[in-house]
Amino acid sequence: MSWNTFHRRGETLRAVVDRANERRDGVLPTGVPGVAENFTDELDLVGALLLKWHARLSGNIERALARQPMDLEGAVASAWQTTAEELPGVRLVIDRCLDDPGRPEMEHAMQRAREAAWVRLAAAAGLASGRGPAAVAAGRRVEQRARLELAAAAPPETAERAVSCAPVGADRSRSALSLADRIRAALAA
């Protein structure tokens, strides 16, 4: 990728992020000028949005952990909420692609991305030290906590959206992560 191509792709991605955040409808903004020229397909564009989300989330986690070093899980959940507030349209696009991926390649990529994100959340929150089902479950609970807290602080018309994309069958209680769950996650990791 040439320097000019890199910059054009970055400019287009910024425009896509801006459009998604303006519309907040969860629809991937493929009509933004430059998308067809700079991204091979929808999966490529969603992948770039995921990278944008995770880069912002990583920075927010780092700052939150510095502010709340004694409550790692709370800090990570707070960072997730902050990121969702900063990139609301991007989060909605990601959630929509997770809920209705369309084609098998997107479904596979989104499921892998979701599980990897949960593992990173669990690790940052001190709930897991490796990959595996326990780390995935712990990270999912951190995200659910963040969604619930975001919904509680949101106006009623948008509160349901914050929680609605939590995995089906997920425990949506704030105290879902008990001490026993943390110990299990640490032992399983």
Image: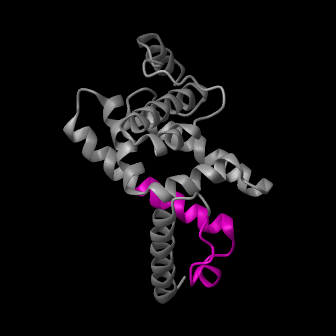
Q: Which residues are magenta?
A: 28-55
Q: Position of residue 102 (x, y in %)?
A: 77, 56
Tell which residue pokes out farthest to the right in this image: 104
**Residue at 56% across / 27% down in the picture?**
137
Q: Which residue is the extreme one toward the bottom?
A: 4
Q: Is residue 111 left or right of residue 16?
A: right
Q: Position of residue 46 (x, y in %)?
A: 60, 62
Query: Relative to residue 32, is residue 179 drawn left or right?
Result: left
Colour scheme: one colour
Compared across the picture, whether 188 is left or right of 64 comes to right
| Magenta-colored segment: predominant secondary structure | helix
Relative vertical location of residue 131 with respect to residue 89 in this rendering, above or below:
above
Q: Is residue 171 above or below residue 100?
A: above
Callout count: 0
Image height of 74 relative to 106, above or below: above
The image quadrant of residue 182 is: top left
Q: Is residue 93 above or below residue 35?
A: above
Return the residue found at the far top: 180
In the displayed orientation, state which residue is furthest to the front: 157
Residue at 57 percent across and 36 percent down: it is 166
Name the residue located 67 percent from the left edge and 64 percent from the top edge: 43
- Residue 97 left/right relative to 179: right
Location of residue 173 in the rendering, given as x and y in whole percent from the top left corner: 48, 21
Horizontal and vertical percent position of residue 47: 59, 61
Locate the N terminus by quadrant. Answer: bottom right
Q: Is residue 70 magenta?
A: no
Residue drawn at x 61%, y 65% is: 28
